[in-house]
Image (cartoon, rainbow, N blue to C red):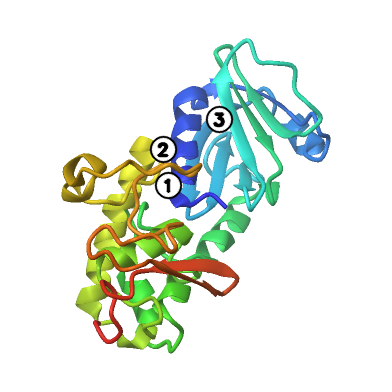
Amino acid sequence: MPEGHTIHRLAQDHADRFRHRTVTVTSPQGKFSDAAALLTGQELTRTEAHGKHLFLGFGAAGDAASWVHIHLGLFGTYTLGETPAPPPTDTVRLRLLNDTHFSDLRGPTACALITDAEKQAIHDRLGPDPLRAQDGPARAYARISRSRTTIAALLMDQKVVSGVGNVYRAEVLFRHGIDPYTPGKNITEPRFTAVWDDLVELMHAGVRANRIDTVRPEHTPEAMNRPPRVDDHGGEVYVYRRAQQPCHLCGTEIRTAELAARNLFWCPTCQPPGAY
């Protein structure tokens, strides 16, 4: 599932290509046809992201049913390109088209036309997002500090922190030397604030580069004279998908385990139990 930086990048890319311009809206697959008929010929006026949720706004602020809410889920994908657009396949749920660009959405978990009130209800159930300027760590820490759940599980709970996925979770815990099995209530507020600030920096870098890189300058392949990572996910990382490989810092074998139906990765030496 795409992490939050991908969704914020999609919001930015749609703004760059379509905002304040009239768009043709279609649903070649047919599942969004009624809503597309209402929207086509309007201007895309606003784009937003919160965690893993994308919102495309049509018409003036306050218009009823003026937002398209999209959640890619596990299988959703986007294709953005320049015109002329290729003939759409019957897998395209939503196509936006203007005279210079097109955008094709396939396989999302959610793609629905919603009102301002329905959009606000989605925001209300999500935790703070490190990529939203108006969000900060206090509300997330209030929940974490009362919880016996592991910090690794809490960081993946979208009601606690929104937008963090498996990669950022594994990497930020490594960068701060935190054992992923540490109960949330054992994490001090200064420690969590440092984690939050690091997520803000890492995820903004992810938006700019459109990929996840988490190693510090002194740990890049060039700096350490080591081979670059070869992985379909791309990006230089410390522990994610590096099970049984040596830690870049200490040489200990990276471990993996399943936690809440997702694979967890950590270095037992660099992330010792009891370091809060």
Q: Position of residue 219 (x, y in %)?
A: 21, 50
Q: Residue at x 51, y 42 (%)?
A: 232
Residues at marks 1 and 3, CA–CA distance in whole angstroms: 21 Å
SS at mark 3 in the image? strand
Q: Callout 2, which amino acid?
A: Asn
Check if mark 1's residue and mark 2's residue have beta carbons within 8 Å.
Answer: yes
Q: Which residue is mark 3?
A: 44
Q: Position of residue 13 (x, y in %)?
A: 47, 31
Residues at marks 1 and 2, CA–CA distance in whole angstroms: 7 Å
User: Vertical placement of 107 versus 255: above or below?
Assistant: above
Q: Which residue is mark 1?
A: 5
Q: Which residue is mark 2?
A: 210
Q: Residue at x 42, y 58 (%)?
A: 242
Looking at the image, is mark 2 or mark 3 nearer the viewer?
2
User: Which comes before the other along the chain, label 1 or label 3?
Assistant: 1
Task: Say whether residue 178 is left or right of residue 40.
Answer: left
SS at mark 2 in the image? loop
Task: Say whether residue 150 is left or right of residue 77.
Answer: left
User: Which comes before the other along the chain, label 2 or label 3?
Assistant: 3
